[in-house]
Every structure is written in structure tokens, then in C-alpha cells.
Image (spheres, helix red, strand yellow):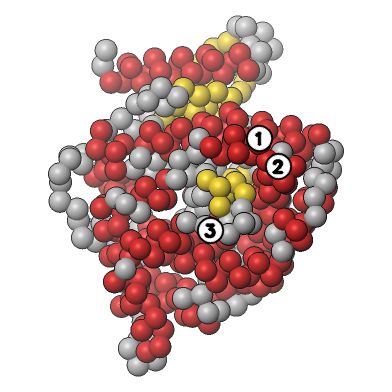
Amino acid sequence: MSGAKDVEKQLRSVVTDATKKLNLSKFTIDLNLNALKGDGFLGEFYKVSVKDDESNSIYYLAIKKAPVEKTRREEQSMDMVYQNEISFYSEIVPAFRQFEQEQHVSKPFDSIARYFTSNSQIGREIIVFEDITKMGYILREKDLLLDDAHAKLIFETYGHYHAISFCLKNKKPEEFARLTASLHPIWKNLGEKERFLTFLKASLKDTQESLNPDEDEIVLEKFRKYVDNTQEIFLESCDYKGQYSGIVHGDCWSNNMMFKYQDPHIPTEVESMKLLDFQLVFASTPVHDLSYFFYTSGCKKLFDKLEEYLDIYYQSFSKFASELGCDPHKLLPREMLSQDWKKYSQFGMMLSTILTKIKLISKEDSIKIIEAADNQKEGDKVNESGFEGLNFDSVLFKQRVRDIVIHMHEIDAL
């Protein structure tokens, strides 16, 4: 069977399975076989509409399909990332919903796209979701930095999301242990991959060059360790050793967040958001999620208000933890959030050096990165920069990453 026909067969099979969740007996599938590339690095995306032949209602679905290229799958731990995401949607999300229902939460967490079904067969992984673009949700342009309204909403959303697993861990420790036991430590695995470390070290070197030897002398001296000991520091930053942990999102850059606005033509008055891509989900400190999105999408104006945003996060966390029958101050003392930030926000800072580059290249160049990964052969020499031949605004890059590093120094987190 040809590649295209095999893909079509896989997609039709999983969509047919999804129609059972929709209680459809007679239906027509309209399948767009043109994969959407450039928006995600861990999968191809397809759009599907399903018409109920009895009521004429139309359901819009989005399908994520795993890459099949052997070397790319190995380099990016593709087997494990899809096992994580399928476990998240098929086991963790239902457990979260049942738990909130049992505790009579006033406004259950609804910032995740509806999941229908999946195929977990290795090499043929597929996940089917509701197409939330039809509900008015959009991706912001990836080069845009956050404004105050978006930042507040994201901190509030993560506050609610994290509160659920913290409380589940407190009230149902055996269930929490069961749900997290099968999750793979993807960031730790990536931190042991030559290709990822090469990209990270190169981005850290470029960040080092953004610092002024005269004006930033003290900061530069502190930052050198990140270039000299990239792997050691990254792996330490991934490995949370404290007691204040829950199930974190794990992959919190801007392309994994979609927003809905009061007026679609005025993308400032943000109404709600959805979190996407839970392939890197793991049990850890909330600081991993918060520092990841904050440093990959924030700006100096926001960095200067970090403690205010952590207060906003904590108010949301406390509200829902209380509704879930727990004492938020025992689950996660506010002062520990700031203390853990000083130690574990290095995770978000280091990733921001790569993501800032990715956010400044065009969608066309993003596709080139994906195609290069698809064509990669085992034993191929790793490009020292990872961005050779790609165009991005190096001046803007240096300005953004310098702001992050200076901020980390100012809060004594560097």
C-alpha cells in the first residue's frame, strides 16, 4: 500500500472510531489529506469534518499523527512522547474531571481541547481532538511577546490546572501514583541526546554573546557555567527534588496555547484559552511550567512584575485547591513558590534561548527544520548551531535573551 493510501486508511479508521463517541450511525467523512506542517515539531496535523447524515450536523476534528521517520523518532523519543500524551488524555484528564465533579467545583477545568480517541500502536500513533479553531480559538503569531492580559490569564489557568493534581495527590495518593507511574521523563531523555544538547549549547553561546563584557561583567561571569556545563545544569534543572509537585504540562511555549477573544478582530480582549500538546507531561514543580512560558514569551516589562504574576497564579491555585477540599498553604506554601523559582526557573531560562530563535524564524524555515529532521540519517553529523541557513533577527534575539538573563541575575536565580 502506498504511503498516502496508508495514511488515509489510518485516518479514516480513527475518525470512524471517533464517530462512536459522537453516537453517529450514518455519517460522511470529509478528509483533508494535506498535512499542516510548521506549527508543531512532534507531529503532523490533519483537519476532518464529519457530517451526521441523519441530522445534517457537522463535527470538526483535528488529528495529530506521529512522524514515521526512524532517526527522527529515536532522536525525539517519539514512542514515549505519544505514550505520554495518550495516557494524559485517556487516563489523567478523566481522573481530573471525576475528581472535580466529586468535589463539586464551581467551574471545572475546561482549558483543554475535547479528546475523542487515539491509536497507540508504536509507529502509527494518532490522536483525535475537537477542532477548537471552529470555536474561535486561534494561535497568536509565535514571534509576539505576551502582554499583561495574556500573562494574567495564563498564570490563572495554570493555577487551576496545577491545583487539581496537587489535591488529587493529597486526597488520593494511590491514584496519583498510578497516573504518574507510566509517564516518561522526556526532558531528561532529551538532555542526554547529542542533537538537543548541541542546539542548546549553541543557543546558550549566542546568549552569552548578547551580554556586554563591560556593562554585564558580573552577569557574564555567572552565565559562563551554562555554556561550560550545559548538560549537567539542564539535567539538574529538570530534576525537581522538593515535595511540592503535581502533574505539569511540560511543553509551554506559545504554539501550545490557543486563545479566544471577545472580538476576533481585536486580539487584545482575551476571553479564554486552551492548552495543547501534553506529550512532555510529567510530575514536577509548577515552576517548570511557569518559567517555561514566562521566559519564552515574556518581556522585561513582565519580568519586572514576576512576584505580582506569581501572586495571581497563587490566588487561582488557592481558590481551586480550597474548592477541592484542601489547604493550599500546606499543598504549596506561597513562599516556597518563590524559593523554587530561584532554583528551577533555570529550566525555562535555558529553553528560552532555543525557543526565542524558533519564535523569530519564519513558518517556512520552521518547515525546513522539520524536513531536515525527517531526512536525517543515523550517524549524520550534528549541525553545530542547528539553525544554519535559517533567517532570524539576531539583533532582536540578543535583546530578548539578554533581558531574560539580566532578570535572572536581578532575582538571584542565575
Q: Position of residue 187 (x, y in %)?
A: 42, 50
- Of the residues under marks 1 and 3, which one precedes in the sequence? 1
Labels 2 and 1 touching (C-beta < 8 A): yes
Residue lying farthest to the bottom in this orientation? 214
* Residue sitting at x 43%, y 20%: 11
Q: Position of residue 208 (x, y in %)?
A: 33, 76
Q: Is residue 254 visible in this depiction of the protein?
A: no
SS at circle 3: loop
Mark 3 vs mark 2, foreground winner is: 3
SS at circle 2: helix
* Residue sitting at x 49%, y 28%: 127
* Residue sitting at x 31%, y 20%: 4
User: Which one is nearer the viewer's eye here, 350 or 134?
Assistant: 350
Task: Write down the residue under mark 1.
Answer: 175
Image height of 405 relative to 117, above or below = below
SS at circle 1: helix
Q: Position of residue 375 (x, y in %)?
A: 21, 39
Task: Write down the residue under mark 2.
Answer: 168
Is disc 3 surrounded by few (<14), some (14 to 19) or many (20+) residues within 10 Å? few
Task: Write down the residue under mark 3.
Answer: 241
The three-letter code of the residue at mark 2 reads Leu
Image height of 32 relative to 242, above or below = above
- Classify residue 68 by image quadrant: top left
- What is the C-alpha distance between the residues marked 3 and 2? 20 Å
User: Which one is nearer the viewer's eye here, 272 or 96?
Assistant: 96
Q: Is residue 340 visible in this depiction of the protein?
A: yes
The three-letter code of the residue at mark 3 reads Lys
